[in-house]
Image (spheres, grey):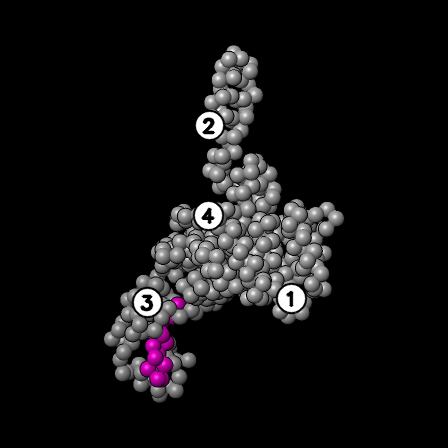
Amino acid sequence: MPSMHAKLTRRLIESNEVLATAKTKNGAVIIHDSELRGFQCKVSPNGKRTYLLYYRTAYGRERRPAIGTHGRITCEQARDIATIWLAEVTRGGDPSRDRQLARAAPTIADLAQRYMRDHAIPNKKPSSVESDKALLRLYILPRFAKIKVGDLTRADVYRLRTGLAHRPGAANRALALLSKMMNLAEKWELRIDGSNPVRHVERFKERKIERFLSIEEFTRLGQALAETEQLSLEFLTVAPAIRLLLLTGCRLGEILTLRWESVDFDEGCLRLAESKTGPKVVHLPVTALAILRDLKQRSSQPFVIFGRQAGTHLIGIQRPWQRIRARAKLEDVRLHDLRHTFASVAVSSGLSLPIIGRMLGHTQPQTTARYAHLYTAPLKHAVESVGTALAAALLSKSLVSHASTDTTDA
């Protein structure tokens, strides 16, 4: 390859003489800068001019990485970059290798694939895996798919947060997932330790929606369910599924995927091998057992709440529920509110929060503590019982009698 030595300047690089030489030789001409050792420009016969830097690594390997194309960067800009790279080489670095590694570095899309394959699918429940897939598809990948894992910044994360301000719940779940992915990226040595960009990004405050049915609403729902069955308005396992949700406090997925081998009629309970919080036992009231026995007589399917296709469980219960709650005039009630209602009735019955937590399958006391504000009636009853029991020791017989009369009148 023909070459020449001269100070690289725009005028020289763009000169007709150099281009003519390249065309005459039918090959590129390399111009070696006379001032900065290793700084070069390759002029091709087609007129393309590329800045290069030649150097040897600390291990003696020859490198000639491209700095950029003339026109996109100027000669002086290329010289500045070459100067910086040579300083790195002097310190034992290898700019060419670093660029290759950067180009090969995984993107957020690559990290998402590895997260699903190596973490989510082996360790999380199918419903949680599907939730992660949806968050990635809807919120994370559309914004960050092509960004390198190591290049994601806190400013990028804040832009995601701002873009989802109208959906605070979805924003918080997306941020939590992204944070987990970044922690794993550090563990897998794809990011520097302690560099998680989601850290210190504030979550939105979410208003917990807790809807409890009153006795009168219970009655309306019961009538709507009876009407649904009598007129065959919905598939025959829809009403039993809703009744079991009310009577057990179970989560929707626990009831819909319930198999007969998990039903223990002798002990009157459900033995769930898997739930959101792990294996658990759900003790059943007599009414729930009666519903299960009736379903057992109707079908030999493996699922208690069997679906339209043989061997499947019921799916798509939300639309039937919307029709049922409309008939009951309970348009703002979600299926999950039946679980909240179960808990509220348990509280009103005077059961302790630890007992209610065990009934609902909570692993954290603070999860059950959300129902503490419903304890007013049981507390008043308890205070009155304790007061009456202690009154004899604290008051004279006449005062005790007077206090008892006041209580009776009230």
Residues shaded magenta:
40-54
Point 70% across, 59% down: residue = 296
Query: For the residue marked with disc 3, what is the amino acid?
Result: Ala
Q: Are marks 2 and 3 in contact (CB under 8 Å)?
A: no
- Mark 1, mark 3: which one is toward the viewer? 1
- Find the distance from the CA under tag 4 to the CA under tag 3: 63 Å
Residue 46 on the magenta span:
yes
Marks 1 and 3, how far apart in space? 66 Å
Q: Please report whichever mark, 1 or 3, sits nearer to the chain's N-terminal start.
A: 3
Mark 2 sits on what residue?
410
Point out residue 132 in the picture as x, y percentages from the top left corner. Answer: 51, 59
Q: Secondary structure at mark 1?
A: loop
- Regarding residue 382, the answer to whether it shows in the image is yes
Against 45, residue 181 (above or below) is: above
Instruction: Determine whether, in the image, residue 30 is placed left or right of residue 220.
Output: left
Residue 312 image label = 1
Residue 5: x %, y % from top left: 34, 73
Where disc 3 sits, the SS reads helix
As drawn, the label of residue 210 is: 4
Tell me which label, 4 or 3, sits earlier in the chain.
Answer: 3
* 329 within the magenta span: no
Q: Residue furthest right?
A: 266
* Circles 4 and 3 in contact, beta carbons < 8 Å: no
Say which of marks 2 and 3 sits in front: 2
Mark positioned earlier in the residue sequence (1 or 2):
1
